[in-house]
Image (tube, helix red, strand yellow):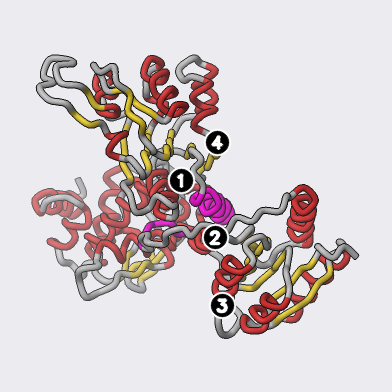
Amino acid sequence: MNNSLQALVIDDEKQISSLVAQVLVDDGWNVSQATTADEAITKLREQSWALVFCDVVLGGPDGYSVLRHFAEMQPEARFVLMTGHGSAAGALEATSTGAYDYLLKPFSIEDINRISAVIKEQLKTRKKRGKSVEKVSQAYESDLALIGTSAKFVDCLKMVGRVAGTNLPVLITGESGTGKEVVARAIHQRSKRSAHQFVTVNCGAIPTELIESELFGHARGSFTGADRERVGLWEEATGGTLFLDEITETNPLFQVKLLRSLQEGEIRRVGSNKTVKVDVRVIAASNRDIETEVENGRFRQDLMYRLNAVTIHLPPLRERKVDIPLLAVHFANEVVSSVDWTPSFSAQALEVLQNYEWPGNIRELENAVLHAVSLSDDIIYPEHLPTRIRFSGETVQHETKGEPIVSPAIIDTEWRPLADVEHDYVERVLNHTSGNKQAASRILNIDRKTLARIITRKQTGE
């Protein structure tokens, strides 16, 4: 038995603990077990461990508490948190605190074997290091919309936690509205640079002829209107993080200067011959496929390699449908944070939200929830959602205030005149408002005169 292959399994659920322990024993590890945080911390003081599997919920101090003790006393140990109630935020907290991995129950024997194999290989090649783990500031906002339990988003936030404490440049990719800036801020706030500025530059919103001056600054008299020397956004971010959003919108000439600044750690203001050393971490983002942009000659390959030391791809919301109810509730609570009531979603409204494809991703969901909350009282029903979402596809039967109704999108299998659909929908809205025409007009987003004309047409059969 290799004395360096010491593993500790911490879980008060005997079945899980025995499974993990047996898999590790079969793979050549010398395994001990603990059922509480206190017992685990005692074992921590008594012996060195190469690999630790620890449940989050232990009935007392939790797995994060154990993780913090290991990070302080045995930072070389590879620590794996296990949880049956995992989330993307939990994955981020775990990996940014020092966890090697974050497993969602039920996990497979293959997951344990994968971690075991990687750690054993690392033990073979690892050189002894006397350096201690630097503390990362935890003065970050806990209210970021890093919400979700989907596997893709959890994996994404694991990566965020792992790279946050490094100084590596990061490239964040994903469709518009997926939360690239939110993730960039999460990296900054969990980094050693969190006490300094996070500066955002939207490269697509700045005219080509001005972006160099905005980013690098300019000397007095360098161009018409430059009546004073100006510090650029790159220098403003000194000591902190510079977020270059929509980096693929820049032109090749500017990309050359950007590459030099990244390589040399210095910038030159427009119209100046002097260089200025600047200590900045760069995080870039794009909603385009950057490799395709390189192939088409619109983006420099050497700059791509410089920017994407680590690449984090954010999945679109349509691939995170399990997260939609969580995000919807979060945004609804934010909208009404200043009032005394809390909105809730009917099951039918949540179903409509999950059936929609969300081309605008999280940003579109947030706007849809804002729209719904503004039209609802205490419960959000499908009719409170924007029209494009309600009628984006066939929906199942839903109910309004306890009365089962059928969406106008599927009233008949045959095509029907628009006027008939309009009349039926108006009638259902009036039933919902108990005949209150002012409330019905608000839901329909039409004025009272238009509503009166629709009612009149139905009564006269026109």
Q: Could you tell which of marks 1 and 4 lies nearer the N-terminus?
A: 4
Say how many tags the image has: 4
Magenta stretch in the rendered image: 143-165
**Mark 2: which secondary structure?**
helix
Q: Residues within 10 Å of mark 1 (few under 14, many from 20)?
A: some
- The residue at the point 19 percent across, 45 percent down is 462
Q: Nearer the viewer, mark 2 or mark 3?
A: 3
Residue 309's disc is 4
Q: Are marks 2 and 1 in contact (CB under 8 Å)?
A: no
| Residue 173 visible at all | no
Identified by mark 2, the residue type is Ala
Label 2, residues with CA under 10 Å away: few <14, some 14-19, many ≥20: many
The residue under label 1 is 357
Which mark is drawn over residue 227? none
Give the mark nearer the N terminus: 2 vs 1. Answer: 2
Which residue is drawn at the image coordinates 42% and 18% (left, top)? 256
In the rendered structure, find residue 91 and report the number of the disc placed on it: 2
* Res. 223 image quadrant: top left
